[in-house]
C-alpha cells in the first residue's frame, strides 16, 4: 500500500497547506506552520501567527510565549500532546508585525477546516486576533476573556473560550494572574474529560477545599 494512503485527513490537509501561496506571506516564510498536537483533542488553542522560532522550527508556540503556555497547561494537568495548537495565520508576518485583514481572510478556510477535522469540545483563542476571527465579532479580548460562548463552525457546535495571549501576559503580571484564573476553568469547561479528578476515599472529616490551581509562574 502506498504511504500516502496511511495519512489521516488532517495530515493530508497539512501537506496541501504546506504549499500555500494565497498571500504575500508565502514569499518570506521558511515554512508553513500548520499546527501540532492530538488530532482528536477536546481542547484546541488558536494563537495569532508564527514568530521567528516557529517559522524556523515549523511548530507553533516554541518561543517564550510557548513556554508559558506549557506551564499553564501543566497547571491544569495537561501537556502539549493532549491538546491541539495552531494559529490564525500559518505563516510568519515579516518582523512579527500584526496580521492584516487580507492575510487573515486568505488563511481563514484553513483554520475552519482544522476545526472541522479535529472537532474539539473547546477552542481557547489566545488574544485579540484569534478571538475576533473565530467569534466573528469585534469585541476586544479585555471584555470577553474568560467568558465561554457557543460557536458554530460549519455544522459543528463548539465552545469558544477567549483567553489573553501568553505573550502579553509575559510582561504584565496582572494579566498573567487573570490568564491563570481563566485557565483554571478549562477542566470544568471540558467536562473534566481531559483532567479527571483523582479517585479518593471519602474523607473521615470535612476538609476545606484547596485552591484549584497554583502555578507559581513568577
Ligand atoms: N507563537 C505562535 O505560534 N503564535 C503566537 O500567536 C505567538 C507565538
Image: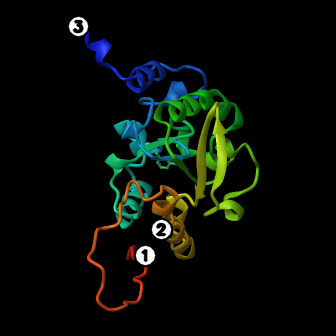
> If you read the primary sequence from the N terminus, does the residue marked by circle 3 or circle 2 appear first?
3
Quarter occupied by the N terminus = top left
Colour scheme of the picture:
rainbow
Distance from disc 3 to disc 2, alpha carbons, whole Å, reads 46 Å
Crowding near the residue tagged with mark 2, few <14, some 14–19, many ≥20 C-alpha atoms within 10 Å: many
- Residue 212 - label: 1
State the SS at label 1: loop
What residue is disc 2 on?
184
Residue drawn at x 29%, y 89% as measured from the top left: 204
> If you read the primary sequence from the N terminus, does the residue marked by circle 2 or circle 1 appear first?
2
Asked if one can make out residue 90 in the rendered structure from this viewpoint, the answer is no
Distance from disc 1 to disc 3, alpha carbons, whole Å, reads 50 Å
How far across and how far down the image is residue 182, in percent?
A: 54, 66
Crowding near the residue tagged with mark 3, few <14, some 14–19, many ≥20 C-alpha atoms within 10 Å: few
Question: Which residue is the extreme one toward the top?
Answer: 1
- Residue 1 - label: 3
Asked whether mark 2 lies closer than 8 Å to ligand 1, one says: no
- Vertical relation: 90 (above or below) 193: above
Query: Do labels 2 and 1 touch, CB within 8 Å?
Result: yes
State the SS at label 2: loop
Distance from disc 2 to disc 1, alpha carbons, whole Å, reads 7 Å
Residue drawn at x 39%, y 44% as measured from the top left: 53
Crowding near the residue tagged with mark 1, few <14, some 14–19, many ≥20 C-alpha atoms within 10 Å: few
Amino acid at each position: 500500500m502506498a504511504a500516502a494512503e496511511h495519512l489521516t485527513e488532517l495530515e493530508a490537509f497539512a501537506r496541501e497547506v504546506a504549499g500555500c501561496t494565497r498571500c504575500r506571506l508565502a514569499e518570506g516564510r521558511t515554512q508553513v506552520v500548520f499546527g501540532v498536537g492530538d488530532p482528536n483533542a477536546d481542547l484546541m488553542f488558536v494563537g495569532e501567527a508564527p514568530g521567528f522560532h516557529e517559522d524556523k522550527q515549523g511548530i507553533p508556540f516554541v518561543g517564550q510565549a510557548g513556554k508559558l503556555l506549557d506551564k499553564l497547561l501543566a497547571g491544569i494537568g495537561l501537556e502539549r500532546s493532549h491538546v491541539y495548537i495552531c494559529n490564525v495565520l500559518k505563516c510568519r508576518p515579516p518582523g512579527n508585525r500584526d496580521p492584516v485583514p487580507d492575510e487573515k481572510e486568505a488563511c481563514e478556510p484553513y483554520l475552519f477546516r482544522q476545526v472541522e477535522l479535529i472537532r474539539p469540545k473547546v477552542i481557547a483563542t489566545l488574544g485579540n486576533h484569534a478571538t475576533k476571527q473565530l467569534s466573528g465579532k469585534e469585541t476586544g479580548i479585555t471584555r470577553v476573556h474568560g467568558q465561554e460562548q457557543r460557536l458554530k463552525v460549519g455544522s459543528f457546535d463548539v465552545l469558544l473560550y477567549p483567553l489573553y495571549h501568553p505573550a502579553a501576559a509575559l510582561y504584565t503580571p496582572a494579566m498573567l494572574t487573570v490568564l491563570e484564573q481563566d485557565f483554571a476553568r478549562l477542566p470544568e469547561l471540558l467536562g473534566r474529560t481531559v483532567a479527571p479528578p483523582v479517585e479518593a476515599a471519602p474523607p473521615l472529616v470535612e476538609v476545606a477545599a484547596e485552591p484549584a490551581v497554583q502555578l507559581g509562574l513568577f
